[in-house]
Image: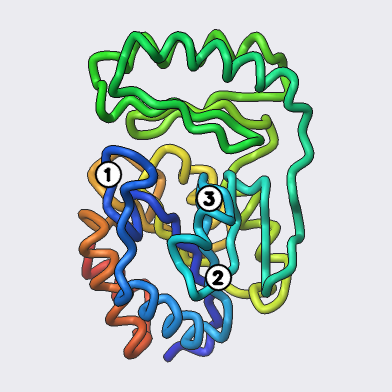
Amino acid sequence: MSMQRYALFLDFDGTLVDIVPTPDAVVVSDELRETLCALRERFDGALALVSGRRIDNIDAFMAPHQFDVGGLHGLEIRIAGKFLERPVSDRAGLNAIAGHLSKRLIEWPGAMLEDKEHSLAVHWRMAPEAGPTLADLMEEATASLGHDYRLQRGKSVAEILPAHADKGRAIEAILNEAPYKDRTPIFFGDDATDEDGIRIVNSRGGLSVNVGARSSAAMFREPDPHYVRARLRGWAQVLPEDFTADLRGAD
């Protein structure tokens, strides 16, 4: 294997696990948990999940194992069991928005509000016809909160979150800590929410992988989470001599 040392960053939904109708319906197999544990050893501990989910939510899916995580688009960061960052926010504005959204969502039974405490996400995968209206509604709600918040759009979801939150920031912060420091990052992500991470990884001379067919700044592509899981299983057994060549073969 190359003498260059790497750190592996993985998005969760749509990358490691398949997209499902609701966030709670995700299924994480024992095989995936075991693969991630083996990969963490292969990368000498430098493996982190970077997600829009809360860290405690990721932990519940990964139990009994616990991984390094950048949660809530980087608002929460935990490495080796210790929190580098935990968000503090004024809930007054979000509470008012949450109440308003809850009333409006009654119009679309398939849509749902996910309250992550420090952010609010509206999902409409089960009510696709509501997408344009709900996206506009979330734009208006975000604007009412001022410059401290921004709107993040994803696949059939829009999320109001603190303006400084993004996955690129999370990856940068983690790369400043052991055992990630001075390593070359590899990042797999599938959605617009992952583009900040992809740009940071590219700027650091790392390797970025988009999962799916959407347009992306990523250097490589995997068709879907099934292929990602298969590739990671292979890496868990034997790391490639040349990651670039290995990923190019999948593109």
Dot 1, crowdedness within 10 Å: few (<14), some or many (≥20)? some
- Comes first in the chain, label 3 or label 1: 1
Find disc 1 in the rendering and name its residue.
20
Residue at the spot of label 3: 197
Residue 245 visible somewhere in the drawing: no
Q: Give the residue displayed 51% in from the left and 45% down from the top.
A: 52
Give the mark nearer the N terminus: 1 vs 2: 1
In the picture, the disc for residue 67 is: 2
Q: CA distance from mark 2 to mark 3?
A: 18 Å
For the C terminus, the image quarter is: bottom left
Q: Quick one: label 2 or label 3, which is nearer the N terminus?
A: 2
- Against 11, is 142 above or below? above
Q: Does the residue at mark 3 contact the one at mark 1 (Cβ under 8 Å)?
A: no
Label 3 crowd bin: few (<14), some (14–19), many (20+), radius 10 Å = many
Quadrant location of residue 161?
Answer: top right
Q: Amino acid at mark 1?
A: Val
**In this rendering, position of residue 79 left or right of residue 45:** right
Residue ID at (67%, 45%): 75
- Where residue 176 appears, x then y in whole percent? 73, 66
Q: Position of residue 153 (x, y in %)?
A: 45, 28
Q: CA distance from mark 1 to mark 2?
A: 23 Å
Q: For label 2, count other residues whose C-alpha is less than 10 Å away and answer few (under 14), some (14-19) or many (20+).
A: many
Nearer to us of marks 3 and 1 is 1
| Numbered disc 3: secondary structure | helix
Dot 2 amino acid type? Phe
Residue that appears at 60% across and 32% down = 119
The x, y position of residue 43, in whole percent, is 51, 82
Note whether 105 is above or below 61 in the view shown.
above
- Residue at figure coordinates x 28%, y 64% from the top left: 228
